[in-house]
Amino acid sequence: MGDPPEDFHARFAAPERLDLLLVIQRAGEVIGDLMIKVEDAWAPARAVSQARGVQAELGWSLRPEETGKGYATEAVEAVLRICFDELGLRRVVAGCFTGNTASYRLMERVGMRREGHSVKHALHPSGAWLDGYTYALLAEEWRGRDR
Ligand SMILES: CC(C)(COP(=O)(O)OP(=O)(O)OC[C@H]1O[C@@H](n2cnc3c(N)ncnc32)[C@H](O)[C@@H]1OP(=O)(O)O)[C@@H](O)C(=O)NCCC(=O)NCCS
């Protein structure tokens, strides 16, 4: 991110506009990234203002040599803390291909619930349309979980 710090903080203060790629650093070295995209929830026309910027979609990736050490878990938990405790969001969602065991194990480790199985919904780099899982976590689940 090339933004000056004041712009960075201003973006966090206006979560309905937040769409960021964060980096995961260890000892000053970038070892992965995290996407956080604040979105509107669906609402009927008369209630759209109440549904604006209330949820986020997350995504993540680690350098392959840095997997298996818990770094993604630590980083995703930090982002969930930002989403719920600082931005006051009501819901966080994420998804992965059904074969991406590492990613859905990570979601389950941080307390996310599997909500859906979509059939042939997304294009894999192999060129095949593959099934995906969607996961979610609500603010009340985050606050109520054992930590
Ligand atoms: C998804 C991805 C980030 C998960 O990486 P990961 O290394 O499994 O996740 P973590 O860094 O949290 O490490 C957890 C693993 O380290 C182990 N571990 C070791 N020390 C740990 C610690 N202190 N805390 C937590 N876990 C620890 C865990 O047991 C776990 O291994 P397991 O799943 O075999 O039980 C990684 O596989 C990746 O970058 N994949 C490619 C990109 C991708 O698919 N992104 C998702 C698109 S939807």
Image: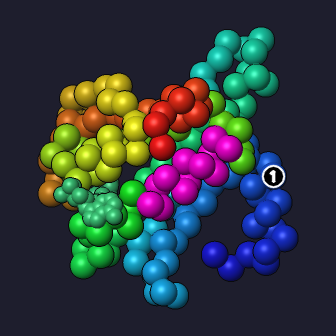
Instruction: Left or right? Give the position of 86 relative to 20.
Output: right
Residue 72 falls in image quadrant: bottom left
Near mark 1 (Cα within 10 A), the count class, few <14, some 14-19 or many ≥20, is few
Left or right? Give the position of 99 relative to 12.
left
The quadrant of the picture showing ligand 1 is bottom left
Query: Coloring scheme of the render?
Result: rainbow
Q: Is residue 13 above or below residue 1?
A: above
Main secondary structure along the magenta-highlighted residues: helix
* Residue 77 counted in the magenta span: yes
- Residue type (three-letter) at the residue carrying disc 1: Ala
Q: Residue 111: x, y in percent? A: 40, 38
Q: Position of residue 13 (x, y in %)?
A: 81, 52
Residue 108 can be seen, yes or no = yes
Which contiguous range is marked in magenta? Answer: 74-85
Residue 38, relative to residue 6: is it above or below? above
Residue 79, how many percent across, how many down? 55, 54
Confirm whether the magenta stretch covers residue 83.
Answer: yes
Q: Secondary structure at mark 1?
A: helix
Q: Quadrant of the N terminus?
A: bottom right
Q: Residue at x 46, y 81 (%)?
A: 26
Task: Please name the residue that numbered disc 1 is placed on.
Answer: 13
Residue 19 appears in which quarter of the rendering? bottom right
- Most extreme residue toward the front is 146
Q: Residue furthest bottom?
A: 28
